[in-house]
Every structure is written in C-alpha cells, then in structure tokens.
Amino acid sequence: MSAASPGAGPLPGYNFAYLDEQTRRMIRRALLKAVAIPGHQVPFAAREMPLPYGWGTGGLQITAALLGRDDVLKVIDQGADDATNATSIRRFFARTAGVATTERTDAASIIQTRHRIPETPLRPDQVLVYQVPDPEPLRGVETREAEARRMHAAADYGLARVALYEQIAHYGRVRQAYNHPVIVNRRYLASPSPIPRFDNPKLDHSPALQLFGAGRERRVYAIPPHTPVHSLDFDDVPFTVDADDTACSLCGATDTYLDEIVLDDHGTRRYLCSDTDFCRRNRDGGPDHE
Amino acid sequence: MATATTVFRDPVHDAQRTFRCALEAMARPATWQALPAAPEPLPGLGPGATALALTLLDHEVTAWLGPGARAAGPGLRFACGVAITEAPGQADFAFAAAAELGDLSAFAAGSDTTPETSATLVVEVDDHEGETGLLCSGPGLAAPTPLRCRGLPPAFAAQWRRQAGRLPCGVDVFLLAGRRLAALPRTVELQEAPCTQR
C-alpha cells in the first residue's frame, strides 16, 4: 500500500475544504488565541456541518480551517482508520479539498482523531486535531456554565479534586478509565476528550501541536508543543495508567492500548491493538519497516 | 483619490498558508518563520503585516493602527471590511512599528473569564537577526530560546514582565520583519540572558 492516496481536486461549487473563507478566518482567530492560552476553552461560532453534532463537527471545522493543498490527512476513530466516522470524514476532505489521505501515522501532516492518540510517536511537523464531545471538565461537578467559567478564571478546581477523591474513597482507586482531566501548563483544567487514561501521558510535552474542537459546545482549545500536561491526581495517590501483560493477538505487542473482542457466549475474548495502523505495520516487520 | 488596496494572488491558499505559518509561530514562540505569500504591501505596512491582515481581519474585528501605519487604513477597510478604531483599548488587532507601539497596557488584555478577548499586536521590527539579550521560555519551547530581533524598544521586556502578573490576561504579539514572522504569546517568559563575553 502506498503511503498516501492522492486527492482528486476539490469538489466544484464549494470553497476549498467546504467552509467559506469568513468562517475559516473566525476559526483561525479562535485557534491562535487558544494556542496562546494553553488549555483555555475559546468560544467559536460553530457552523452547521453536513454531519450531525456529536460526530466530530468540532474537529471537522478545525481541520477545515487548517487544511492546505499540500497536507496529507489521516483520520482515526478509536484508533481505527476504517471505522465509519473516520472513513466518512476522510472521504469528506478528499472530496471537498482534494487533499491526499493516508492511514499511516508517519505519513500524515494532520491527524484528526476521535478518542485516541496514535501509538506511533508524533513529530513536530504534525498537528493532532481532537473531536471533543464535552470540552468542559467541570461539567460533572458544576452544571452552571457561568459558574464553571468563574471557577476556571480563579483556577478553583477543588470540586474536580473532590470528585476524584470520592472515587478513591469509595473504590480504592480512580475508576475513570477515560476522560481523566488534566492540568495544562500548570493553570487550566482541561478535558483530554475521552481518550483512555492510557493515552494521557502522551499529552505531556508532545512535540506536536494538539488542537481540540467541540462543535456542539462551540469551543476550541489547544495544547502547544512541549507544554506540561499533568493528569489530575494527589501527592499520595499519583496518576497511573492501567497496564498488564496482555498481548495483541494479531501483532503480539504488549505495550499498546487493546480493544477487547468478545467472541462467543462463553466469554471467550481476544485482544487487538486499537491503533490499526500501528498493529498492521508491527505485523509487517515493525512500525519503521516499509 | 484612489484607495491603495491589495489582495492575495491566490486568496484561499495564500491565506491558508499564511495562517499555518502564524499558527506555527504562535505554537513555537520566538522561532522565526518565513511567510509563504507576500501580497503588495499596503502603505504603512510591511509585506508580512499585510499578509497577516488579509488572513485574519474581517468585519467581525476592529483594528488600531499606529501613527506610521495609519496610511493603511482605507486599504485595510476596503480589502478586509475591518473597522478601524482610534482607541487602542478597543482593538482586537493592533498594527504598529515597534518604536511607535507605546505601553502594552494600553491594549485590551481580556478578562479573567474571557482572556481570549485580548488584543493581538502585529509589531514591525527592524530585523529578524540581532541579539536582544532576552531568553524566552514557556509553552511551545523545549528549552529556553534566545529572542533574536532588532528594533524592540528597551522598555518592552519590563512591560512584558508586568503583564505576566495578570495571566491569563495579556496581549499576544506577532513580530514582523519583512516577510519573516515570529510570535510571543502571553505565556512566554522573558528573562535577561546570562551575560556572554563582550
């Protein structure tokens, strides 16, 4: 398989990458402010997209504002390039922008993702765009938007810590397997979008720029490269990721995030890498092997 | 009198490439980037500042122009539909030569709940080379990076440090030197570099 499928040229009758120029300017201005204030949610005037809210319209609009003719786009849904959501979004930009697309993490310049960070380490020349369903990490403890904003303004995150403490007090450990909130640049509490806890360490000091878009909630936020990102925890109960020795039944990797597949009514299970590109290249002789 | 105005040669793609350059600059402070597209500069603005204006300004924002950049007003209004204000505190974007910028505290710094409403300053410096004796650190920088440029007023570093006390409020700065661009987002910390031998 070639590294990237070439695009066919943009769809006639539409602006490049679907969105009109005024919308792209508005999103671009919001993104510049988001990068300047790491972790702070910047409101933006999310447009209706030809995709329902909740299917990645925030990520879609960020990608549309970023995308240029020379970009190579990869889209993943829970690590997989071939899931419905990822396939639709990839095809959307192949049609409306005519850009090249790829399934290979190392061949992409922009990676739009739903709920995973690729296993292959990212490079400084790559941008990771997250589809975020709920950008407000305080929503679970404070339903009032105005109050949540005041709490962010004052860096008043005691309630979020109490919520975490209650999990530890009740269950002896943090039960939240995904969407574990993070403190960006020692200042803002931010939602990592529902990535598994396993991926949280990859947010920290990433060499790549990370942009987060929530279409329904009309917010963008960002983590610049080389920015400290600390998963919320306590001095005496430090953040840990769940790890065991289970190996991927396809490629044998023991250090990747695995999907559990139930095979029959007797509870027989198989485990597969969630990152399909990493798994395939691992089977082909290692991620760096062509 | 005819208005001197300007456009990108390839409006959609030149704006896209200029934005990516600006985003890269903002994500990696104090790192000079070469702008890919240079439109015919407006009177009072350099080619880089003109490219940024065409990329980021429209009828939704307000711009303030420093004394030397005033001549660009009619052209900017025509090309971008941007409102021009006389009051620096009301501007979303400010265009000025470094020497004419005045005190940073004159510009909108945003509020604690909406720090993103602060101004973005587009500041023309003399050159992208030259020692400032300042070291930048903060998000976007793996290691402290010397700020290289010529023409930044001596008072800038002190004003910048004063604004750091108001974080997350504060202005963000693009430095322009011809077609070169670098950024100082508000999170950048400026320190005097340890003295090297003279």
Image (cartoon, grey):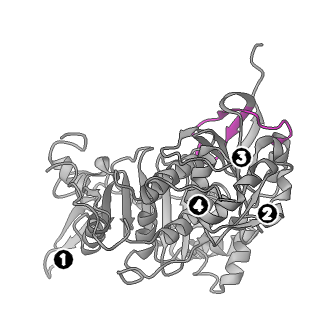
Say which element carries label 2. loop
Relative to A263, is A196 above or below?
Answer: above
Q: Which residue is mark 3?
A: B123
Q: Is residue A288 above or below residue A215?
A: above
Residue type, numbered disc 3: Val
For the residues labelled 1 and 2, the Cα–Cα distance comes to 61 Å
Q: Chain of mark 1?
A: A
Quick one: label 4 or label 2, which is nearer the N terminus?
4
Secondary structure of the residue carrying numbered label 4? helix
- Are callouts 4 and 1 both on one chain? no
Q: Could you classify mark 2 by the number of other residues whose Cα lies within 10 Å: few (under 14), some (14-19), or many (20 or more)?
A: many
Callouts 2 and 3 in the same chain: yes
Do the CB atoms of the residues marked 4 and 1 lie less than 8 Å apart? no
Say which residue label 4 marks.
Answer: B56
Q: CA distance from mark 4 to mark 2?
A: 18 Å
Q: Can residue B192 be seen in this snapshot?
A: yes
Q: State which region is magenta.
A: B134-156
Return the chain for callout 2.
B
Labels 1 & 2 near each other (Cβ < 8 A): no
The mark lying in front, picked from 1 and 2, is: 2
Q: Which residue is mark 1?
A: A267
Disc 3 crowd, CA 10 A, few/some/many (<14, 14-19, 20+): many
